[in-house]
Image: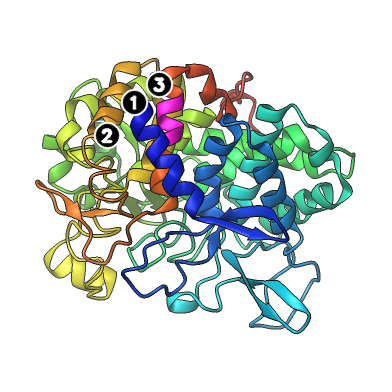
Amino acid sequence: MPDLTARAWECLNRARVTLNGRTLGVRASVDDTREKLNYDHCFVRDFAMCAPAFLLHGESGVVRDFLLTTIRMQAHTRRLRTFEPREGILPASFRPVPGESGTVLDADYGEESIARVTPIDSVFWWMITLRAYTVASGDTELANREECQEGIRRILRLVLEGSFEMFPTLLVPEGSFMIDRRMGVYGHPLEVQALFFMALRAADELLVGGDGLREAARERLRNLRMHVARFYWIDKDGLARLREETPDQFGEGVVNIYNVFPESIPDWVDDWLPDGAGYLAGNVGAGRIDFRFFAQGNLLAVTADLADDSEAHSLMNLYEARWRTLVGEAPLRLVYPALEGEAWRVVTGADTKNGPWQYHNGGSWPCLLWAFAPAAVAAGRMELLKRAVETAEERLDREDWPEYYDGRNEPRPGNRARSFQSWSMGGYLYARACLEDPAAADLYRWAERVTPEEATRT
C-alpha cells in the first residue's frame, strides 16, 4: 500500500520535534482543531512506538538523538524528599519552550499529568528503544557511551532495589503506564511485567561491567519468566484447576498461593474462551486474578518470549476465534471486556472518558498494531497480521489517523480523540514493514530463550 505509507509518513513528518536543526522526537499529535493540552509534547512511550518506523526508513539518527536527549533528562540524585523524581526516573514527555537564552527542553515527570501519576514505563520504553536502535543500526557506540551505561545502571537500581515484596513482579500504582487513568490496574499489571521483562533482556544485552547489576537482571528475568508462566496463564485447563483449588491454605506447601476463591472467576470467561486458546491474565495479586484481556501485555509477552511457543500459538488462536471482540473494524481493542454498570462506577471512579467501550475501558487503539506485528511474526501467524493491517488500511487515513476509537460493535473515532496521532501512524508503518519483511520483527525479539526451569526458587 505505497500511497497509504507515503501518506502516513507525510503526516508523521509534520509532528517532528526539532531543536537546533535536529529531530528529537515527535509530538503526540498535530491536531489543530482541539485544545493542545499536552499533545504537543514528545512522549517517551509514544515515540518508542514510532522509533521502528524511523529505524527501518533509514533515519536512525532521529532515534539516536531522541535516546540521548531523553537520558540526559534522567533524575540523577538520590532523594528522600517528596515531590521530586527519584534517581533513575525518566520523564513521561518533553517539549521545547522559550528560555532566557533561547529555546530549552521542558520535561514532565508526571507533575502536569492528570492525577499527577509518575510514569514507571518510560524507563522501559527507553531501554527497549536503545536495544532496537542497536539492532537496526549496528551502532554499538551509543549504548557503550558512559552516559547511556550509567543510565542503564540507574534504571536497574530503580527497578531492582527498594521493594517490600519478595515476588519477582513489579508493584506499580494505578495509572502509571499506557492506561494512565483509574482502571483497577494497580498492583502487578501484565503490561508492566512484559515491559519490565523486555527491558531486563535489553539491559542484559547492552550493559557492560561487573558491578553485579547484570547478574541481578538475569536472575530476575528467570524468576519473572517462571512466575508469570505459573500464575498468569489462563486456558480451559487452568480455569478447571482454579475451581478445584482450596482457598485459605497455610504453610509452605500450599497450592493456592494467592488465596484466589473460585467464586471470583467471572461468568463471561467460560463462554468466551474457546478450546485450544489462552491468554495471560491482566493482573495477579493477593486474593485476586484480573481476568480481563489486556492486549499490549499479551502481545509483548509473545514478542519477548515471556510466553512460550505453545502459549503464543494459543494466544493467536484466541485472536482468530474472537476476532470481532479483540480486533473488530478498528484494530485493536486495548481491554476486553469493558467495565460497565456498578463495576464501572466503583473501579474507574465514574470516569466519563473511560465509559464502557471508550478510551482505555474497551476502546480500540491503532497504535497496538506496533505490538501485534512482531507477536504475529513470532507465532508464525502472518495471515492474522495481514488481516489486521488490511482492516486498518480501510479507515485510518480516511479518518485522519485517530488516537483511539470508541464503541463496541461499530467503533467510531473517540469522542475526545485527537486526529493525526503519531503513534497511530508509527504503529501502522511498523506493522506494514513486518508484513512486507518479517525480519523487521527482530528489532524486538531475541534469539536465545529465557527458561523458567533455570530460575532461582525461593
Could you tell me which residue is drawn at 57 percent across and 38 percent down?
54
The residue closer to the viewer here, 142 or 316, is 142
379 lies left or right of 55: left
Q: Which residues are magenta?
A: 429-433
Amino acid identity at mark 1: Met
Look at mark 2 in the image and give the residue it sits on. Answer: 393
Look at mark 3 in the image and give the residue it sits on. Answer: 435
The residue closer to the viewer here, 57 or 408, is 57
Give the distance between the C-alpha atoms of the residues marked 1 and 3, in whole angstroms. Answer: 11 Å
User: Disc 2 vs disc 1: Cβ atoms closer than 8 Å?
Assistant: yes
Could you tell me which residue is drawn at 14 percent across and 69 percent down?
342
Name which of mark 3 and mark 2 comes first in the sequence. 2
345 lies left or right of 89: left
Amino acid identity at mark 3: Leu
Name which of mark 1 and mark 3 comes first in the sequence. 1
SS at circle 3: helix
Q: Indicate which disc residue 146 carries.
A: none
Look at mark 1 in the image and give the residue it sits on. Answer: 1
Callout 3 environment at 10 Å: few (<14), some (14 to 19), or many (20+)?
many
The residue closer to the viewer here, 83 or 37, is 37
SS at circle 1: loop
**Residue 269 percent location from the top left of the image:** 18, 41
Q: Is residue 41 above or below residue 139?
A: below
**Residue mark closest to the camera, 2 vs 1:** 1
**Residue mark closest to the camera, 3 vs 2:** 2
